[in-house]
Amino acid sequence: PTDLLAKVAGRDNPWAVPVIALIGMPLYIRVESAIPIGLALMTKGASIGAVIAFIISGAGIAIPELTMLASIFKSKIIVAFILIVFVTAVVTGLVFNMLI
């Protein structure tokens, strides 16, 4: 649903970067599919920062990865990992929006 994501991730929405990072968290975005997804979102009107945040959160906090990490680490480490990746995605997206 690129139209819905692009509407949420538009440049006029001040909450676009954190919201789109939350939407991308449960998705499993591979490197090979990140560029076409990002181009489709930007073509529909999403800001570059929202696309960057979406790709970082989707690649870093995918459910398959969390399932694997949960079998190895304690829950506190998993929560810290999720928070670090989410904050990194949001900060990077906001920086890209400010610079471009």
Image: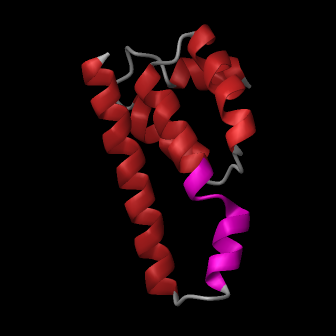
Q: Is residue 90 magenta?
A: no
Residue 95 shown left or right of residue 26 in the figure = left
Quadrant that contains the C terminus? top left
In the rendered view, would you say 97 is above or below 17? above
Percent position of residue 53, x then y: 47, 38
29 left or right of 48 in image? right
Left or right: 59, with 21 as reference point: right
Q: For the magenta stretch, what is the residue range?
A: 59-70
Residue placed at 47% from the left, 65% from the top? 82
65 in magenta: yes
Residue sitting at 39 percent across and 21 percent down? 13
Q: On the rendered image, what quadrant is the N terminus found in?
A: top right
Residue 73 point in image, percent of width and height: 55, 88
Q: Is residue 15 above or below residue 39?
A: below
Secondary structure character of the magenta stretch overall: helix
For image coordinates 70% across by 77% down, the residue present is 68
In the image: residue 12, left or right of residue 73: left
